[in-house]
Image (spheres, grey):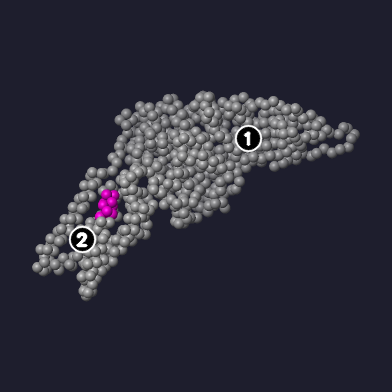
Amino acid sequence: MVAILFETVTGLWVTLFPFHPVVQWSLLIHTVAGVLTLLPLAWYCGVHWHEYRRYALSNIVVLGYVALVGLAVCSLTGVGLTVQGVFGVRTSALWRKVHLVSTGVMVAGLLPHMVLVAMKAFATEAAPAARAYVLRTIGGTGVAIALVWGVHASQPGMPYQNEFPKDYSYLYGTNRPFAPSLAKTDTGRAFDGRSLAGSHSCGTVGCHEQILQEWQPSAHRYAAMDTVFQGIQQVMAKQNGPESTRYCGGCHDPISLFSGTKNIFSTNLTALQGYQEGVSCLSCHAIRETDIQGNANYTVTQPREYLWQWETNGVARLARDFLIRSYPSEHGRLAKRSFKKPEYCAACHKQFIDAEVNRVGWVQLQNQYDNWAASHWNHKGDAKKTVECRECHMPLVDSRDPASGDSLDYNRTSGDHKHRSHRFLAANTVMPVALKDQLPGWKEQFDLTEQWLQGRLQIPEISEKWAAGPIVKVAVAAPPSVDPGEPIPLRVIMASNKVGHDFPTGPLDIIQSWIDITVRDAKDRVVWTSGKRDAKNFLQQGTFLFKAEPVDQNGNLIDRHNLWEMVGVRYRRALFPGYSDTVQFSVPCSGALGTNSAPGAMAPGAGEALRIDPPPAIAPSEPGEYRIDVALQYRKIDQFLLNFLFGESTSLTSPVTEIARASTVVKVNGPKPKAGVSGTVPQPGRSL
């Protein structure tokens, strides 16, 4: 009876009391006690039933049968849940509910049954023995519960140090310790860095192993170890003060930000956990509130830990996994409906600077959220027509993960065996290569990113509402023929086809997307180019570029991503979703090799124009043709910034991805007939 009473008390304790280490110990000891007493309890119940099976169905007997049925179901489901907790990846919610309900049935039958039995026993000469039995039961249960508290006192869990360093600089006031970032904790205090780290522990024993593998080479994972971010952060700290780097920390390095590492006296602006994990599992899943203002305007809550939460091996890990599976309420709080909203992404994927950073005033920077919200992809209130951030950047993949399935989406079910990819595919092909020694699966991430940029990845769930083909379409228009010596008027049209925000997007002061043109004659000789890279990876002067050129308050170009000095933009060109842009070129047709003289932005710090020896010119009297190939190219980081951060001798360069291409052929007419000689003159046209 002590075992039944202890199991009942601890079981209800786990159900009714808030998440706490002592409750977790109760669950563990509850399980162990249940396993140890299962056979003795079954034997006792069998003997008890055998003694009373011929009794008339009095109140006591009926209640005894009710309690027996409840105990049997409770025991069977308990065994099932224990097996699932030890050997599975999750426990059945239905079984947990039946286990709880059957406990209630058992208590409803057993309590009045025992009261009636005790009243009858106390009314006879057996009263002293009955009284002793009751006291032994209560006393034994009390000792067992005291044991739970004693074990908890000796092993209370990891003690977090939620304090800022003693020398922490409150540059913007004690009420805004993380400024100029808008990120904040729900307590206003620091969080021990360990409480938001430990992402690798999420992938043990087949739990979120697949999601962990996707996250490991992702931009969220390397957000803090990004070598360009690290270099710029160090420059920012030297020029604008270490506290200013908190502006970057909310999105790139939240663990370091919230643990107080980005401090005036700190030589290392990134904590060890922050550097290794960037936007970790918990730093993202612990967010409880976001705001579309941007600049990491979100509130994070410190997750309450399970016992041995960060263990990845041995008995401690098995106990941790068992607790999470058998007591999933706290773990379940990490999955929230708010993740589905684009507004959740806006907290980081929208950026501005103001006087706290540039000492002058407010300037809008990258803004993917507002781009999307104002675009044709957003049909507010109609999920079947809207294409959201997660549908593109976190497409559904076949899943063996316990988190698979979702009945809250209009097009999904709880048993669809899919989860949203945590690769967060976007446009960075630099860091997977630069950090390949630290990123498991970097090559696959790189290849998928290139396919993503080229529009070759298929996403079945949105195929009916998302465009097909490249992310940006390219077409060329030119006359079908020209006379010798006449320039070829060339028009290049680019249309944003399937991008959910501006193309390109992100920090446009360092991103480059440009038009690459090659003109060849009938003998396949290159006679004119634009948008080529030289041996040092700089673009030809005059190359047409999609990018931005921010300036400081003295009008100087911001070319080192020194946004803390930015006050405005002197040039910006990008494609809004669904819109097109056109650029015109004049290609010489004399046969002499040339480089473009079309209007366009030149890369900051660009080198000399590409020069190659000209082939023999096509004589004006010689008919022929020109083949014109046009490609839209993209690279994440311009070479000037890489050289500034890592030296001109660096081997680091940004891979170039061809987004789309188009071609046309322009014929060169033969000599015109002399006066008085009949003939026809070809009429101009155009080719798309």
* Residue toward you, 611 or 475: 611
Q: Residue at x 38, y 43 (%)?
A: 201
Q: Residue 466: x percent and y percent?
A: 57, 49
Q: Residue at x 70, y 36 (%)?
A: 628
Q: How many marks?
A: 2
Q: Residue at x 23, y 70 (%)?
A: 50
Q: Which mark is residue 515?
A: 1
Q: Residue at x 58, y 27 (%)?
A: 536
Task: Find the magenta span and give its range.
Answer: 23-33
Q: Which residue is mark 2?
A: 1
Question: Disc 1 or disc 2, which is closer to the eye?
Answer: 2
Q: Horizontal and vertical percent for residue 337?
A: 42, 50
Q: State how far apart marks 1 and 2 are (Cα).
A: 82 Å
Q: Are marks 1 and 2 in contact (CB under 8 Å)?
A: no
* Secondary structure type for disc 1: strand
The amino acid type of the residue labelled 1 equals Ile
From the viewer's perspective, tell me whether residue 624 is left or right of residue 660: right
